[in-house]
Image: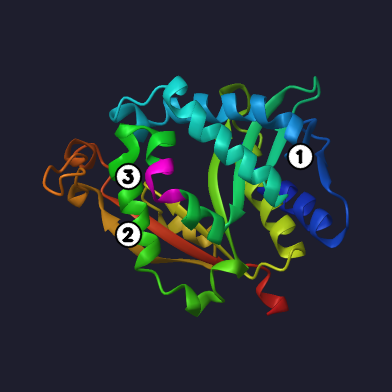
Amino acid sequence: MFRKDLAWYDQLLRQFRSGNENYLYDFKNKISYHIMEKSDIAEASRISAQCMASNPFYRIISMSADEYLEDSTFSCQESVKSRIGCIARNSQGQMIGVHVAYSLSTAINVTHGQESYDRCGSKLVPLLNALVELFKTTPWHQYGGIDRIVYLDEVSVLKNASGKGVGYILPEFALVLAERKGYTHAAAITVHKITKNDLDMLPNWKEINSIEVASITGNDGKERVYESISKNGFRSISLYVGVLNPSKL
């Protein structure tokens, strides 16, 4: 169903990009898309935490929704500050999708340090260390510098909204908001293998850095804490960068 309706979603996004509205309405699916507001944080955080807990990657490291909630709330707060994070609601006004997004400089600042470790919990500390290493070893100056790059964090969609393009429209909606604010590039991290078909749909994106999951160690620098994850198909954590609206550059 998603592939069949892709042309429709792209048409909606083109109209949104060419206008100056801060919301988008998909009248076929009766879903509205909005900038995340302060009043949305509590609900958006719960949805994000719930979806993260059901993510295969986090299930392997036994992260529960409650354990993820504090960091999810923090990320939503940063998204509201950025005016780039966004949400989707159905015709009953229920929130069905959340996309956390903010500047790369913010992402880098909030990923390392004791405050970050306390917020995310011990199970995620090795992953945070890996992200810090990815951020540190990426030549950001080649992409305009960290202040001109928007960071696309988690996309969370409730199961009852699957197949309606929510997971596709939310990031694109956020990218339009980022373009309007003068960002020239976007960055995103994935633990899932990106296929050729995926890249065909994302022609302006490329992988620029990665780290092997099996090589991630604990705080002692010795124990390979995520080795079991790599055996379950999560081979690497990859960093992708995309050009925003390349015709304008």
Q: Quadrant of the C terminus?
A: bottom right
**Mark 2 / mark 1, whichever is N-terminal:** 1
* Residue 115 visible somewhere in the drawing: yes
State the extent of the magenta-drawn residues as a range: 111-116
| Viewer-nearest of discs 1 and 3 | 3
Q: Which residue is mark 2?
A: 133
Q: Is residue 32 left or right of residue 96?
A: right
In the depicted structure, whether residue 4 falls above or below residue 90: below
Given contact means CB atoms under 8 Å apart, are the residues at marks 1 and 3 in contact? no
* Residue at 54%, 61% in the rendered image: 105
Near mark 1 (Cα within 10 A), the count class, few <14, some 14-19 or many ≥20, is many
Q: Secondary structure at mark 3?
A: helix
The tag earlier along the polypeptide, 2 or 3, is 3
Farthest front residue?
Answer: 114
Horizontal side of 239 relative to 185 (left or right) equals: left
Q: Which mark is residue 66?
A: none
Seen in the picture, residue 5 relative to 28 is either above or below; the reply is: below
Q: Residue furthest right?
A: 20
Contact check, label 2 and label 3, Cβ < 8 Å? no
Of the pair 144 and 125, the residue shown nearer to us: 125
Q: Is residue 54 left or right of residue 35?
A: left
| Three-letter code for the amino acid on which mark 3 is drawn | Leu
Place residue 139 in its image quadrant.
bottom left
Three-letter code for the amino acid on which mark 1 is drawn: Tyr
Which residue has dot 3 on it?
127
Q: Tell me the tag on residue 33.
A: 1
